[in-house]
Image (cartoon, rainbow, N blue to C red):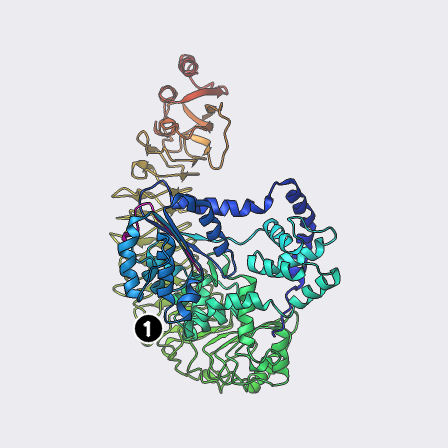
Amino acid sequence: MELKNTFNGHEAKFIQQIVQDVSLKLHLINLSIDRKLVGMETRVRDVISSLELDLDDVRMIGIKGIGGGGKTTLARAIFDHISIWFEGKSFVEDVREVSKGSLYGLKDLQKQILSSVLNDQTIVVAGVSDGKSMMKRMMPNRKVLVVLDDVDDIDQLEALAGEPTWFKPGSRIIITTRDEQVLVAQRVNVIHDVTLLSDEEAICLFSRYAFGREIPDQGYEELLGKVIHYAAGLPLTIKVLGSHLCGRTEHEWVDTIERLKTIPLEKTLKRLELSYNGLENDEKEIFLDVVCILKGEMKDDSIRILESCGFKAHIGLRVLEQKSLITISDYDGLRFHDHIEEMGWNIVRGLHPLEPSKHSRLWIKEEIEDILVNELGTEVTRSIKLKYTSLHPTTIMRGLRKMRELRFLSVHVHEGDIVWAVDEVCQYLPDALQSLHWPEYPFRSLPQTFQANKLVNLEMVESNISELWEGGEKKVLNKIRFIDLSYSKLETFDLSMTPNLEKLNLEGCCDFFKLHIPVECPKLKFLDLTSSKVSNLNLRMIPHLVKLYLDGCNEFVELHLPIECPNLKSIGLCGSKVSNLNLRMTPHLEVLYINGCKELVELHLPVECSSLKFLYLRGSKVSKLNLGMTPHLEDLSLKGCYDFVELHMPVECPELQFLYLGGSKVSNLNLEMTPRLKELDLEGCYYLQEIHAPMGCLKNLVYFNFNGCSRFKHFVVNKWNKVHDPYDVVRLNLIAESLDRCPLHPESNVPKFQFNCIYWEPLPSSIGNIEKLISFGLCACTNLESFSTSICGLQHLSELTLIGSIPEVPNDLYQLSIFRIAFVC
């Protein structure tokens, strides 16, 4: 049997927490009436709701989940709950096992359904085709409830519930399976995922089997916590352990739990293995790589690694997910139940549980180190994942010499403060390698003897590599598709060595200064040279590039693009010295980051750029910008563009939500073209004189910064993430200060003013106030009377306060203004 250390340091802490919570959970169970049914009742209610029993149609629903996860129990509970409402009923157990157990399996199941539904035990079914005909002819006369339990093949459904027309309206068909694709192919109405038991539900279920009641005996809290942690919510394991520990002493409990650390429950593994046995050979290989090597990896990274090893990863991972063997999260990567992991490990160890050198995959640090140090490797090993080892790099390479069929190698040396003295002569890597991941690789180049003819994926982040091959040798790597040498010491790279390269990541390679592109690279889609010393780049030989990043390339001055660049979607050029950027040949551009390009004076976008969503030009010298046709633009930033004077929007930008123009020289702005604007920053726009904002066009505005404009010294509206009192009202507080001169009209003799403005608008339905307030004209020479008239037009204003003396204003005008403000209040 396999060796497995189930409870490591992190898990021990988790178990302690479970143990601390057990007493509280047991108390909650004591307070509940028939608490054991709470979880099941909720699950039953959810499924029955989706059956929509009040509708007069035929509905098929699926219940999907891991083996031993409670699908049959749930289906049986539903069947017992609602079968009274049907004219005929049949619960068909073990469809998979019965249908594949003999040549007559499906025929026998057809007979079982017909006999049960029609209540006629004399029915004879000659064959599967005859059974289909009989079901089509005889079933439509009765409203039936049929449960098909543990289905794993579409042929089974075609024989037992082929079409909705086989059944009378009002009939309901429930199918349980581990394979979601079976349900998808049958076009069921709803698919339910069976959720595993909570700790509280697990305690109830275990106690019923171990103690004969819902509440466990006192004194077992710590042991019970360990059992619940091991079971991880799987009902089958909970039942097996509960039955096994029933009537046993505390010492026998301890022995059983200790045994689980090295020998998992065989009954659970056998049930789970049924899903594995149903996989194709390549899918089995993918599954074993996932559970042994790729746990926790993000989906895209896993696909890259698996594809590098020759697998069809997209469909392979999807099949594993549909068969309830793994789950794929956008945030957590590849995940699976602990017992699924145990099952996979058990399969890999196979007939040699105590001889790791004979295993196809190695992932346990101590076992790998023993094999490498003692040079026990064999050609059986295909994949190695060695994490946080303190072995010397040359020891690792020496130990790899007998693993000539190794296709995947991941090494993470725990260096700490160690500076390795490495012998370049002793380098060795197996020629069979297809995916190599070795961060902080200590050597200056790849081994001279390493042919790398099969290498597809190379990842050596923060490595000591300064050139791929010693002495600048050029070995053409025809199969390599992915290279990540980010933050390495690489200085140059010749793309003629990698004709099929798709992704090149050299981010943070501060010594890198030259990318040679002597031949066309038709497959290269991703290029990252961030923070390198590259000064110019000609991409005419890379016509299908999708993403280009040159951020932080402080010496970069010139970018040449192909005449047509239809695939380019994302460009990062922040901090470069580019002065002119012509992007007219990038019609499908989605993201353009060119912040901090202090020398940039001209930017030319395509006339029609229908995919552009994000455009950042902060801190450039661009003076004008024509957005052309950019209907999907969401975020536009020109903050700190002190020479910018004109923003031209020839058509509406219906998706624009964020507009930043702070510090620019824009004198007028038309917001009619941005109906969904949420955030507008015009801080320090001293030359701004006019904003065109027709009534209602700013109804979505939640943040507005007007600080330092010629009329307002301070004006900020911020309604982001605010919870308002229902009695809040729209308020405007103004503090008026006189000005000696208008920055826009220094010769004007008209009284001049500047305001500190505090505006409060809590009601999301209030529209019109902001438009009125900012559209009256923004010159400091604006007559105060016209300003007060504008205030009178605010539709929803409930409170307004004017503070401060204005001695320069004629008495009558001041009194007139106060009168009008008072009238509004």
Residue range in magenta is 164-177
Camera-side residue: 195 or 593?
195
The spot of residue 449 in percent (x, y) is 49, 87
* Relative side of 89 to 66, left or right: left
Residue appearing at x 36%, y 36% in the figure: 688
Q: Amino acid at mark 1?
A: Cys
The spot of residue 204 in percent (x, y) is 62, 50
Residue appearing at x 45%, y 68% in the figure: 506
Q: How many marks?
A: 1
Camera-side residue: 605 or 359?
359
State the residue position of label 1.
521
Q: Does any portion of residue 234 appear in the rendered image?
A: no
Q: The C terminus is located in which quarter?
A: top left
The answer to which quarter of the image holds residue 709 is: top left
The spot of residue 192 in percent (x, y) is 43, 52
Camera-side residue: 815 or 550?
550
> Can you say whether 530 is above or below 370 in the image?
above
> Can you say whether 309 is above or below 302 in the image?
below
| Mark 1: secondary structure | loop
Looking at the image, which residue sits at the far front? 122
